Amino acid sequence: MAENLRATIIVLAEATGAKRPWNPEGGAKFPHKEKPDADLIENLLKAISSIIGVEVDFPNPFPTEFGIITSRGIASHRSIQAIYQAWRLKTLSVDHGKRIVEVGAGLGRTAYYACKMGLTEYTIIDLPFTNISQANFLGRVLPPGFVSLFGEEVQGATVRILPWTAIEEVEEFDILANVDSLTEIGKETSTRYAHFFAKKGRLLWSVNHEANHETVAMLEPLKGLSIGRFPYWFRTGYVEELYLTPRRPKY
């Protein structure tokens, strides 16, 4: 498992451009395929930090977290991918705006890294129980006052956490992010989120598998809006897709 985690950090370095990918078609003169030892990982984390513009860290507010030990904290699969996801949102925000809504945010790690990268208008939409977990994590790793919950006034908060039942309270936004849930929650619910995006958003960034009957591309509100589709760096069978609404202004 540790080897897999080290390999995931190498993928993150390749995805962000901090490391050249290995070319299996005859090799290369440049030494791309180094052995993933401790020094390599530390050097890659330093290079990734330089590329993404913030110091990579792995906050571990809860005991017995599983991962590999680095000088920056214990790195897990989810935290490594969250760095990539936040970096993708940062790069997309240059052209499409910085108001982010994430549907299905897990523990909130992507929101944490996105805040570090300057995306300071971030809304999470999720199940109420998951909202509790997100508030617990983000409340521990972000400065005081950076998180607001449903029913609270937003007074300088960077991350707003809302239950899915409060989706209509969300104002217009720039980017809707969804990783690993739109194809899992059923056609009725996923179509509702797609309508929500088409009504209030500008760009949808989706990372989902296509193993179930319904896919993201099949959602009716997204028909004709696709502007990009390519494999996801970290998980075989997952696809990154971009959907753009033609009428939504940038700001």
Image (tube, rainbow, N blue to C red):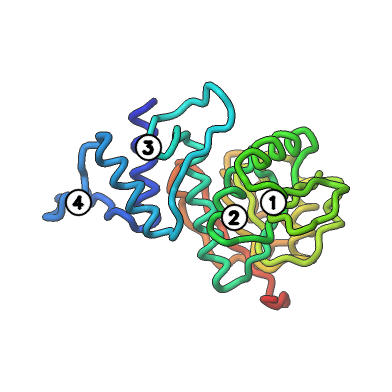
Labelled pair 3, 1 in contact (Cβ < 8 Å): no
**Identity of the residue drawn at 57% across and 61% down:** 118
Mark 4 is on which residue type?
Glu
Could you say which disc has been placed on residue 146 in the image? 1
Which secondary structure, mark 1? loop
Q: Which residue is mark 2?
A: 115
Nearer to me, 208 or 94? 94
Quarter of the picture containing the C terminus is bottom right
Disc 2 residue type?
Cys
Helix, strand or loop at disc 2?
A: helix
In the foreground, 38 or 211? 38
Disc 3 element: loop
Please tell me whether mark 4 or mark 1 is closer to you in this view.
1
Q: Which residue is mark 3?
A: 71
- Mark 4 in CB contact with mark 1 (< 8 angstroms): no
Label 3 amino acid?
A: Ser
Q: CA distance from mark 2 to mark 1?
A: 9 Å
Whether residue 173 sits left or right of residue 239 in the image: it is: right
Other residues around mark 4 within 10 Å, as few (<14) / some (14–19) / many (≥20): few
Q: Please report whichever mark, 4 or 2, sits nearer to the chain's N-terminal start.
A: 4
Query: Considering the image in quadrants, where does the N terminus appear?
Result: top left
Mark in front: 3 vs 2: 3
User: Real-space Cα distance between discs 3 and 1?
Assistant: 26 Å
Gap in angstroms between the C-alphas marked 3 and 2: 21 Å
Classify residue 103 as left or right of residue 211: right
